[in-house]
Image (cartoon, grey):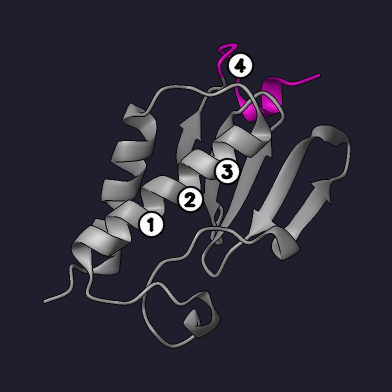
Amino acid sequence: MEVPKRERLDEFFRRLLAAPAVGTADEAMQQLSRILDEVEDELTGIPNVPDNWREDGRIYPPQTDRMRPVPGHPRVRRYRTAGHNVFVGENGSLQIVALDGAVELEKSGFDGRGVWELR
């Protein structure tokens, strides 16, 4: 039986926070994607077929075509997913915010600064 989505997200957040800090936005996205895919592979029987994201129930990493600039913050990228906005700083920092505005995860980059500390 598949583990409920909330429990899978909580496990993903736990593992992502436990992973070493990284130094670039690309490394942060690679780490996020790898950990999320590992959690979904381990806790669901759902095949990894991103084209099925609307109906299969699997949680997929943010896709590059969903990246947007953040006005006033040129060192931050925003990715829109089905349930979250994922902010990625050029220093490898992350902030994941639910669509209702709740901050679900904050992780500093390798330099110890968070997404909104970049100037």
Which residue matches tag 3? 29
**Mark before the other along the chain sequence, 1 or 3:** 3
Badges 1 and 3: C-beta atoms under 8 Å apart?
Answer: no
Q: Main secondary structure of the magenta part?
A: loop
Q: CA distance from mark 1 to mark 4?
A: 26 Å
Along the horizontal axis of the image, is 102 left or right of 3?
A: right
Q: Residue at x 66, y 34 (%)?
A: 25
Report the mark closest to the observer, 4 or 3. 3
Which residue matches tag 1? 37
Q: Looking at the picture, tell me which residue is in the foreground, 63 or 11.
A: 63
Report the mark closest to the observer, 2 or 4. 2
Badges 3 and 2: C-beta atoms under 8 Å apart?
Answer: yes
Residue 92 coordinates in the image, percent (x, y) = 61, 28
Quadrant holding the N terminus: bottom left
Disc 4 marks which amino acid? Arg
Q: CA distance from mark 2 to mark 4?
A: 21 Å
- The residue segment tinted magenta is 110-119
Badges 2 and 1: C-beta atoms under 8 Å apart?
Answer: yes
Quadrant holding the C terminus: top right
Q: Residue at x 28, y 62 (%)?
A: 41
**Mark before the other along the chain sequence, 1 or 4:** 1
**Disc number at residue 9?**
none
Q: CA distance from mark 2 to mark 1?
A: 6 Å
Which residue matches tag 2? 33
Q: Secondary structure at mark 4?
A: loop
Disc 3 marks which amino acid? Met
